[in-house]
Image (tube, rainbow, N blue to C red):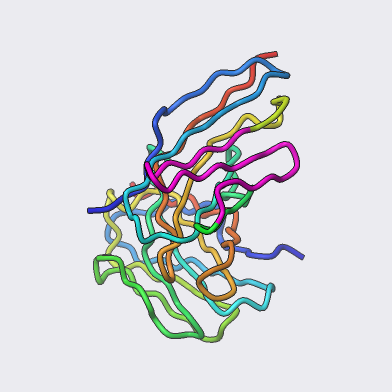
Amino acid sequence: DTAVSQTPKYLVTQMGNDKSIKCEQNLGHDTMYWYKQDSKKFLKIMFSYNNKELIINETVPNRFSPKSPDKAHLNLHINSLELGDSAVYFCASSQGTTGEAFFGQGTRLTVV
Amino acid sequence: GESVGLHLPTLSVQEGDNSIINCAYSNSASDYFIWYKQESGKGPQFIIDIRSNMDKRQGQRVTVLLNKTVKHLSLQIAATQPGDSAVYFCAENDDYKLSFGAGTTVTVRA
């Protein structure tokens, strides 16, 4: 009964590959996000979706493509993975823009 | 650009003492602030929030203070426990996104 769940938890892949991370929330929220956390723990917004519509794309390379099939899901597809993409990616959700955001457990992506 | 940041990257505190974690923000238009706690291997977890029409808010063992004049936010943890060891982030809600500061790592000494 996890509120925000991401899969996989760990992902190790070679440069140049394409990979996807899935996210689902069962909180009934209308807004979902992807954040990237680097090795220094800095958290940065990547994308924000409200009611399946892209609201924010925070200067993320177009190798990253989010997809929201419905309000409960926001998946992240990454093409042509690079070493610099190695990080922990967090999915989150909130109700509207003024409530607290609930985060998933994160996906640790390692590109070798 | 405008950002949210923390004064100190690490804080070591004796178990049972009070902890104070500080945060400076630069967007004077921000009206909602949140403190998150992130334990090792987990996602950030909501601790407490405050809106700009307040200057203080209390939760269980935690208090958030907001000083809009100097754009400063602080989190006070009373009677710090070993389970409080984590990275703490302040964040400002800026329409459809949270902008996080660099975290403060809190270590509780037994």
B49 is higher (above) or lower (below) than A55: above
Highlighted range, magenta: B54-76
Q: Position of residue A46 (x, y in %)?
A: 36, 64
Task: Residue at 36% x, 61% y: name it.
Answer: B29
Q: Residue A31 lies in magenta, yes or no?
A: no
Task: Count numbered badges in the picture.
Answer: 0
Q: Is residue B96 above or below residue B39?
A: below
Looking at the rendering, which quadrant does residue A57 occupy? Answer: bottom left
B31 to A73, vertically: above or below: above
Q: Is residue B39 left or right of residue A57?
A: right
Instruction: Point out residue A18 in the picture as x, y percentages from the top left corner.
Output: 35, 67
The answer to whether residue B53 is above or below residue A33 is above
Along the line of sight, which residue is nearer the eye, A70 or B54? B54
Left or right placement of residue B25 versus residue B34 in this view: left
Residue depicted at x 54% and y 54%: A106
Q: Quadrant of residue A44?
A: bottom left
Quarter the C terminus of chain B occupies: top right
Between residues A108 and B58, which one lies in front from this camera angle?
B58
Residue A22 percent location from the top left of the image: 53, 69
Residue at the (57%, 69%) spot, across then down: A94
Q: Which residue is drawn at the image coordinates 39% and 69% (left, top)?
A: A47
Does the magenta stretch mainly form a helix, a strand or a loop? strand
Q: Is residue A17 left or right of residue A88?
A: left
Q: Position of residue B89 (x, y in %)?
A: 49, 43
